[in-house]
Every structure is written in structure tokens, then in C-alpha cells.
């Protein structure tokens, strides 16, 4: 075993520098799929005792898994090969861009000589041009850099700085002849500076004067928690501010639990016109809305039916401050944390008096009826009781997302979902990535059989790394969310019916290492949930049989609003 | 059931027109994954009795499967949703572009109104711009068209014409509000014209005079069969010409069996300096080489070690005629068939006398040693005997491709592989697509365990559609081709060890519908192969255990040549 921070050849190289940077950024596992253009770089991972190579079943899964890891840890990296690898991953990577998750993709490229000589080599389009795939990533808004012999440390530094300051993903191309490029070890000194806050720019005065005024004077304020607060790790700061001021707040499906929902001021998860009446009333009567870190989308707002009156709304997103319908500031996204911290300096004279919560904290366990088939409604009620403090609940953007949105989460529990990019198949690998990054938190995955099919080979990854998610697999025989949208009985919504116990065994699970149950009745579900509350963590898959048209009520309302214009 | 050619709403629409066009092009099955932006289009498939919707486990698999289907049938179509769907598929689709396989992707887009109003909707990047993904496809060189209310029939016609005349893939965007756009039924009359040969342009005189001269005078001619002859369905024409002239010929790994290898003039599969000595001598002594339909790449040529002397070579690829080192003609790829037909008019005074074949036709069955573990060499010998006339042999571009290249295929057997794009995971879905398109041919798939992992969920597809490939799964515990390239014992080459019998059962196989055997000895392999020769077709998976470093000898030579410059 070679000394940490030194490559397989003994020299300090660009590969070692890159890995030192990742390690400084808290990364302990690197994901991906090997390919001939990246193998020498991978050697540098294997020689380290402080980083683990965790190969995936395919590249798309690696991209999803890295996304889940970065959501917990604030950074993740995965490695693909040129062309075929990076394009297999690109949908998952686009999701990191769209949702703002700082993932680095390291792409092994053909040698500099091959590129210069425009050779017709495998994994290229065969036209002698090697920048097509970088251009495609740029089209997605993803920053790309390529290591060259005189632009190596700088290339690494730029992508890392991008990740750290904007929380957006980045792409680093590493030609396979440059993995052993020597780097002067003195550059290691620079690494901590890559992770510092961006240079301070003066906080714009006017908007924050208006914010102070609003904080001071508001009679019916409402704070809306958006996903960028999670992205920039600002949940705790905002939570402390809310506690001190006594402000009521809501979150969105994109940001459930970013500020803990167990606080007394939590009013619910707001979802436009499908939110409950009390919540809608709260929004409508607000004299000031602080909309923090959300760029509202069709899914988040139930078809843009949100009732935030621009004239009473103060919006801060990474890059933009708008006050009362007027865009006052447009700056780089990296200043968002400073803005939020500045807002958190705004004080009332006295905290607002607390009002009664509109949603009960942890409802009672529902009473199961023997032999009664599980319904979506019963599943939702049982899950609401089952979720524990500090849990991570990952939901596929199918019926599960709508199941979870009405839950009031216990202390420090949070939800991971993907409401804008909304890529089917995301949730399972993302759950594994999140769990690997933070194994001390219990992870619940709520996912349908249709979604699970897309990326199921990561069962191999889960078993290999002894991960212990609780997979609540809603076996509703196809794409139920799509059935509700259109074509309830259409055959195109059917998927193959799997035997999940065989599947677990196929991927190497042994009776000692997994827990499986097929659940059809309410009693079976409650029994399993009760047993799990105190059981030893194991890879658990509960196959919960549901009728194929049994969907959350909110989903049906949502669909009506979303497709209103069609 | 609605009348064929009329949509679910009774009107004749652009969706019906598109499907009528595909049906005219021999398509009987349409692949893909449903999503909310494409559901109404899918309805038009379900109402027809002459087309079947065949949903896939995920979009990448759909793209691969469509590629296999198009290789048999000359055309294929698959449907994805906007953003997440098309980007999941894009690696497979890029392979169709790179290898020249005419696949149409139909992408369901957000409504025209949503796009015009620049709404922040799911599956978009959230920036109000909806053409990013089309631009990415264009970067790959793929033609894109989008249906609009006054450019609907024309958009369909253009993509189909592209597919038919250039054998390249194309992308058709269909906004979800336009699926029911009425189309005058009179346009149906046009459909046959979409499938006619391109307008004749005069064949350039000079090159073909030189070709006639070469055909007439050559003392040691050699014809090299390239993949574009398969792509443009010119194998039969060239085969007849070769038979009449008595010319010796070779094929390449990209084109094995395009002209049947059972002909006496077949000299082998040429692979640069890893070809056998007799074959290399044949190439070196050639006074004229006719290089037909191949753009030589690193893999095809074993690191550009081919010995075609430009001064003695006549090259025709789709778009380019070069003679003796001089590029004489550059035209649209669509004229390639005319050129080849013109070449096939060139005649010798008398056919060349035949020489002895250098490779035996169908070698004898190797004699198994009881208890002797199967080796790569034994597998290769057994496979050489096992392949039957008219078989389709699909090989993943791992060790399997090198196993197959030294086989001399029996009459009308052919190989499908992907030597330029070389995307791991391609072969299994492609085999299913090819088999579905041409169920009368026996399909053998040779694939490693590492490759199979990437796309294995299409086992569900195989079982659902009662497909009966013979899967020769080389269980060599990881990515053996990569081990040979670099890092023989490196952990990153390991993959989870699967239990394939459980896997088959997980996807719904029942004892009546599949055949499985785990093979470790030579005797077991020969016994299974013998049994299979006369057995009822069933989904068959033979798990053939090999040592993890046991690779074809040609692969090791190849690797040495390919990475010579590193």
C-alpha cells in the first residue's frame, strides 16, 4: 500500500492532487464504471487507504448514486469513460444540474496524441473531433474543464471552485496519457483555499433595508423554505432565525424537512391549490411572504396554482433578489449564503406569538383490519407513524412523492426527491448514495415497481456494500402516476411482474443479510413496520401490493391542475 | 378496436400518418418507455392491430433494442419522453449514429403553449428553453425535426427520407398537444414515395473506368467487405459479383457474414497485424484492394496496423470514392448503393481460378475432457462447431468479439457487434431486438457477466415476448477485456456475482419457459451444445464459468497493438 496522497508510480501527479482535493472535500467513496480511458486514474484510488472505489452496475446509476451522496455530504464524484460512459450517465448528471447538486464527473478521455491526430478510435463519433460530448454538457449549462499538460491544477481548481461556491455540478476531462502528469506537491497547500467562502462582495443595502422593515412590521408573515437552502446548507441558520422570530413557515415538496417540520411554527407542505384549506388561507392572508431558495416549477406549485402575491413577496434564489415584484439584484449564485445570513440578522422587536400547528406531529398508528387489503390511504397513514426522527425518506416522483408530501416529518427527518427533473429510476440509486454518505441515518425508500425496474442492478451495489435501506416497494403493477395522468387501463403502463425475493437472491443476498416480506393486508403492513422499528438494520424490501389505480387523492387533484391547459 | 390507420379519436391525425409510414417501412413493433408527454401518441399504437407497443425496462435499453431490430429489418422506431427519457437513451442512439443504423426516435415534447410561454416545467432544465436536447442530438450529427401545426407531414417525411436514404438515425419531436393534429388522408398516397431510391445522379465516369480496369487486369485482387454493405443491404449484390468474378475476399469484425463466409473465396476476417500469417500475406501481395463500405477504425484495424497500400486501394464508403490514394468523389451518402451496383457491373474476361480456403468451414466438434474446466480456447472451438447456417451471433465488445472473429461462419450466418461505438451493455438488448425482428433465425448471444449487468432488466422483455435467444454468458467475474488492457487484478474490474437462475425466475421465467445450466467443464459445455442443436427453442442461459484472466489470444495481441502509443 502506497502512502496516502501518492500515486501507484510514486510521483505526485495530477490524479493524486485531484483525489487529495476530493478527500479534503469530505469524499470517502468514488463511484463509476471502469473503461480503458480511465483505468490509470482508477489505480490512484486503489492505492489510497482513505478513498474507496465503489463501482456501479452502469453509468446512469452511478450518476444517480453520486447525486444522493452529494445531497448528504455536499460533494460527490463519479468516473466514466469517454463517449459511451459519459452519455450513459448524462441524464442523471443533467438531474444534478437541474436540481443543483454538486457532483463532479471525471471523464477519462483518449490520449492527447490520439485527439491531436484526429484518429478514428472507439467511443468517438469517428469524425476525428473529440469535443462533441463536452459541448453537449455545456448545452446543459454544466461547466466543463479538460486537463492539459499546462492547465492541470488550474482545471481541477476551477471545477472544484464551481462545485463549492455554486453547488452546481461540473465535468472534468482527463486524457488517459495525463493521469501521471507530475504536479509540484506545493500545490497541496492550496487545497483548503478551494473550500473557503467566495470573496465577500458588499451586501446590497436597499433590499436588506426593505427586508428588515418587513421582518419588523409584518403582521402575517410567512416563510417558504426552498430547496436551495438545503443545497447551500442553510437550513440550520434559517431554522434558528425562525425560532427566534416565531415566524410561521411552510416547505415545498422539494424541501421537506430542510427546516425541521417538528417545529411548532410549521404549517405544512405547501402545494398550490392542492394544499389543505388552512394552508391555502395562511398563504392568502400573508402580508409578507419570504420565498427562500425556490424557483417555482409546475410540479412544486401544482401547475402554477400557488397564491404568493408578487406585491407581498420577497424572493431570494441563488443569483436573484426580487422584492414586491421588482428584481433588485442579479449576481453570481455564490452570494446566496451571504444573503440568507444577512436576512437572518433581521430581527423583530419581539417574537411572534405561536399559533396552533395545522398538522399533527406523528399521528397515531392506524388500526389495521385483519384481511383488509392495503390501500394507498392506509399505507400513507402507516408511513406517517413509521417515520422516525432523523430518517431520510427518499421518494420516487411517482405516487410516492404525493404519499409523502402530506406527512409531517419528525425532528430532523428529511425527504429527498427530484421534483423538477423528475427522472424515473432516480430514487433507488440516490437512496443508496445518501445512505453510504450518512450510514447513521435510517433510510426509507418509497418507490413503485415501475420505477424500480429502471435501475435495479444497484441491488448488487447495496449488497456488496452491506447497505441497509428499507425499501417500501409499491407493487401497483406498472406506472400508476401515468395511469392517473392518461390511459388508466392502457397496456403501455404495464411492466413485467417481478419476483423480488428471487431478485434479492440473484444479486447475492443471503437469508442472513436481507429481510423480505410480501404484504397484502393492513395487518401485515403494521406488523412489519412494528418489527422494523427495533430490528437490526438489514437490507429490507417490503413488497406492498396495491391496486393499480389506487393513488393518493392529492395526486388526482394535482393532475387535474397540471394538465389544465391541454 | 378502431380501424387500422385511424386514431383513437376517429380522425386521421399526424400520429396515424407517422404510424402508417412506419408500418409501410415493415415495422411491426415500436419500443420505448411511456411518459406524460407521449401517452396520447402511444394510444394511436394501441388502437392498431398491425403494430404492437413493446415497452422496455428503461430508455437506454429501448435504444439498444431498436438498433438490433433495425439491423434485421432496415428500420426501427422507439418512443421516449422529453428530457429525462431522451437523455437516458442518448448513448444507445449515438451508437446508431456512429454505426449507421436507421433508428427513429420519437420524443414526446411539452405542449406548444408551454414552450411558447417558457414555463418552468418538469423534465426541462427550468430555464424556459426547450431546444437544448435537440441541439445535443444535432451535436452528435443526428438529424432532428419537430412537428408543428404547419410542418407536420413534412417533418415526418424528412426524417423518414433521412433514414431510408442515408441509413442514419433521426429524431422527431412531437409536442403533446399535436398528437391529434388532423392530417388530410390524401397524404397517405405519398407514403410509398418515401421509400423509393434517391433521385438518380449521373455516376461519375472516371472512377468507374478505373474500377473496370482494375477488375479486368488485377492479378492478385482482394475485396474487403465493410459494414456499410450491410447497412445498405448490398451484401447479396456483392456476393453475386464475387461469385461471378471469382475474387478472393475478407471481411472485418464489423461485417462478419455480410457476404457469406461459406463461399470458397473467403479468406478470413482481417484484423491488421493480429490476423493469421496467410491472411496478412494475402493483403500484402494484393495488387488491387477494393475496400467497400468501411471507415477503418482503431478496433477494426488492431490499432491502425492494416496493410492496405493506399496506392493499390480503391475505397468506397457512403459519400466518398478514393482511388489509389486520391479522393475523387464526395457526394451524399445516399448514392452509395448506386456506386456499389455500378462496381458490380465491372467484369473480368474470365473468372479468377479459385484457391484453397485458408480457414476450414465448420471445424469438427472438439473432444471434451471429463472434469476439465472450460477454457476460453475450448469455448471458442466448441462455438465454432455450434454455429449453424443462418444463425445470428451477437457479441458484446468484450472478449466475445475476439472469440467470434476467428470463426468461419456457416452459410448465411452473420455477426452483430458494435466495434466503433463499443458501448458496454449493448449486446443483450440488441440481440432481443434482432430476434424480435427476425424470429425465424436462431440467435446466439455471447456476452460476459460484466456486460450483462448493465442492461439485464430486458430479461423481463424477453420473457414477456417469449423470445428464445441462446445466451452464452461468460462468467469470468468481471470485465476481462479491461483486465487485459490494464490492471489485471485491480478490484475495479470486479462485478457482483449473480445467481442467474434466480435472476431468470425474478423476471418471471417458469421451468417450462426457460433452460438454464451452469457449466464448468468441457463435457458439460459439449453436452449442452449437443442438446441445443435439436431442442425446442426456449429462452436459454448457459452460465459458462471461465478464469478471470482467460482471454482470447488475439485479444492480447490486439491490446498490445492498440495501446502502442501510450
Image (cartoon, coloured by chain):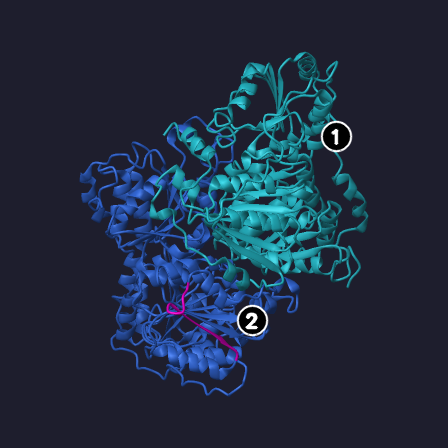
Chain colours: A cyan, B blue
Residue B526 shown left or right of residue B246 in the figure: right
Label 2 sits on a secondary structure element that is loop
**Residue A259 sits in quarter:** top right
Q: Residue at x 59, y 72 (%)?
A: B548
Closer-to-camera residue (B94/A34): A34
Q: Where is residue B244 drawn, in percent x and y? A: 26, 74
Chain letter for mark 2: B
Q: Where is residue B384 drawn, in percent x and y? A: 42, 78
State the separation of the CA atoms marked 2 and 1.
53 Å
Q: Which residue is drawn at 62% across and 63% down?
A: A512
**Quadrant holding the C terminus of chain B:** bottom right
> Of the numbered discs in the image, which one, if any, rests on residue B476?
2
Q: Where is residue B85 drawn, in percent x and y? A: 45, 45
Closer to the eye: label 2 or 1: 2
> Of the numbered discs in the image, which one, if any, rests on residue A199?
1
Closer-to-camera residue (B24/B192): B24
Closer-to-camera residue (A344/B157): A344
Q: Residue at x 78, y 56 (%)?
A: A4
Closer-to-camera residue (B336/A534): A534
On the question of residue A177 being in view, the answer is no
Residue bounds of the magenta highlight: B509-520
Q: Where is residue A275 drawn, in percent x and y? A: 51, 27
Q: Which residue is drawn at 68% across and 14% down?
A: A206
Residue A292 shown left or right of residue A370 in the figure: right
* In magenta stretch: residue A407: no
Count of marks, rendered view: 2
Examine the rendered structure and indicate whether residue B279 appears above or below residue A14. below
Label 1 sits on a secondary structure element that is loop
> Of the numbered discs in the image, which one, if any, rests on residue A430?
none
Q: Pointer 1: residues within 10 angstroms few (<14), some, or many (20+)?
A: few
Amino acid at each position: 500500500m502506497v502512502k496516502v496522497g501518492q500515486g501507484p508510480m510514486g510521483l505526485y501527479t495530477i490524479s493524486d492532487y485531484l483525489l487529495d482535493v476530493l478527500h479534503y472535500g469530505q469524499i470517502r467513496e468514488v463511484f463509476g464504471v471502469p473503461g480503458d480511458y480511465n483505468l490509470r486514474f482508477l489505480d490512484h484510488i486503489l492505492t489510497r487507504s482513505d478513498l474507496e472505489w465503489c463501482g456501479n452496475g452502469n453509468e446512469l446509476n452511478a450518476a444517480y448514486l453520486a447525486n444522493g451522496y452529494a445531497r448528504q455530504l455536499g460533494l460527490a464524484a463519479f468516473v466514466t469513460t469517454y463517449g459511451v460512459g459519459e452519455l450513459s450517465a448524462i441524464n442523471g448528471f443533467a438531474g444534478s444540474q437541474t436540481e443543483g447538486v454538486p457532483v463532479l464527473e471525471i471523464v477519462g478521455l483518449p490520449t492527447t496524441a490520439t485527439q491531436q491526430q484526429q484518429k478514428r478510435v472507439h467511443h468517438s463519433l469517428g469524425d476525428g473531433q473529440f469535443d462533441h460530448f463536452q459541448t453537449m454538457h455545456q448545452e446543459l449549462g454544466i461547466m466543463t474543464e479538460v486537463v492539459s499538460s499546462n492547465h492541470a491544477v488550474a482545471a481541477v481548481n476551477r471545477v472544484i471552485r464551481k462545485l463549492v461556491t455554486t453547488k452546481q455540478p461540473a465535468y472534468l476531462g482527463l486524457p488517459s496519457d495525463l493521469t501521471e502528469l507530475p504536479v509540484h506537491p506545493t500545490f497541496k497547500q492550496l487545497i483548503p483555499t478551494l473550500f473557503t467562502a467566495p470573496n465577500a462582495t458588499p451586501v446590497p443595502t436597499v433590499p436588506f433595508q426593505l427586508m428588515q422593515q418587513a421582518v419588523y412590521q409584518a403582521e402575517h408573515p410567512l416563510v417558504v423554505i426552498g430547496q436551495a437552502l438545503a443545497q447551500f446548507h442553510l437550513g440550520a441558520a434559517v431554522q434558528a432565525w425562525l425560532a427566534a422570530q416565531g415566524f410561521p413557515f411552510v416547505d415545498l415538496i422539494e424541501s421537506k424537512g430542510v427546516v425541521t417540520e417538528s417545529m411548532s411554527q410549521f404549517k405544512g407542505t405547501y402545494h398550490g391549490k392542492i394544499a389543505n384549506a388552512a394552508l391555502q388561507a395562511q398563504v392568502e392572508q400573508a402580508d409578507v411572504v419570504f420565498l427562500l431558495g425556490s424557483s417555482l416549477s409546475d410540479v412544486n406549485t401544482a401547475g402554477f396554482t400557488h397564491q404568493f402575491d408578487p406585491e407581498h413577496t420577497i424572493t431570494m434564489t441563488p443569483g436573484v433578489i426580487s422584492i414586491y415584484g421588482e428584481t433588485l439584484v442579479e449576481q453570481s449564485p455564490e452570494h446566496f449564503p451571504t444573503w440568507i445570513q444577512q436576512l437572518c440578522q433581521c430581527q423583530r422587536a419581539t417574537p411572534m406569538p405561536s399559533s396552533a400547528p395545522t398538522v399533527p406531529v406523528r399521528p397515531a398508528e392506524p388500526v389495521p383490519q385483519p384481511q383488509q387489503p392495503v390501500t394507498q390511504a392506509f399505507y400513507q397513514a402507516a408511513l406517517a407513524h413509521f417515520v422516525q426522527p432523523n430518517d431520510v425518506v427518499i421518494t420516487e416522483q411517482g405516487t410516492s412523492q404525493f404519499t409523502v408530501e402530506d406527512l409531517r416529518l419528525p425532528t430532523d427527518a428529511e425527504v429527498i426527491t427530484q421534483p423538477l427533473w423528475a427522472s424515473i429510476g432516480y430514487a433507488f440509486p440516490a437512496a443508496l448514495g445518501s445512505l453510504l454518505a450518512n450510514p447513521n441515518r435510517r433510510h426509507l425508500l418509497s418507490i413503485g415497481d415501475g420505477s424500480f425496474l429502471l435501475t435495479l442492478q444497484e441491488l448488487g451495489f447495496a449488497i456488496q456494500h452491506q447497505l441497509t435501506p428499507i425499501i417500501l416497494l409499491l407493487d401497483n403493477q406498472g406506472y400508476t402516476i401515468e395511469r392517473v395522468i392518461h390511459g388508466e387501463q392502457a397496456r403501455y403502463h404495464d411492466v413485467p411482474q417481478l419476483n423480488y425475493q428471487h431478485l434479492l437472491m440473484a444479486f447475492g443476498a443471503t437469508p442472513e443479510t436481507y429481510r423480505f416480506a410480501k404484504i397484502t393486508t393492513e395487518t401485515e403492513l403494521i406488523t412489519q413496520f412494528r418489527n422494523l422499528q427495533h430490528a437490526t438494520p438489514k437490507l429490507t424490501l417490503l413488497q406492498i401490493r396495491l391496486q393499480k389505480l389506487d393513488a393518493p387523492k392529492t395526486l388526482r387533484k394535482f393532475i387535474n391542475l397540471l394538465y389544465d391547459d391541454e
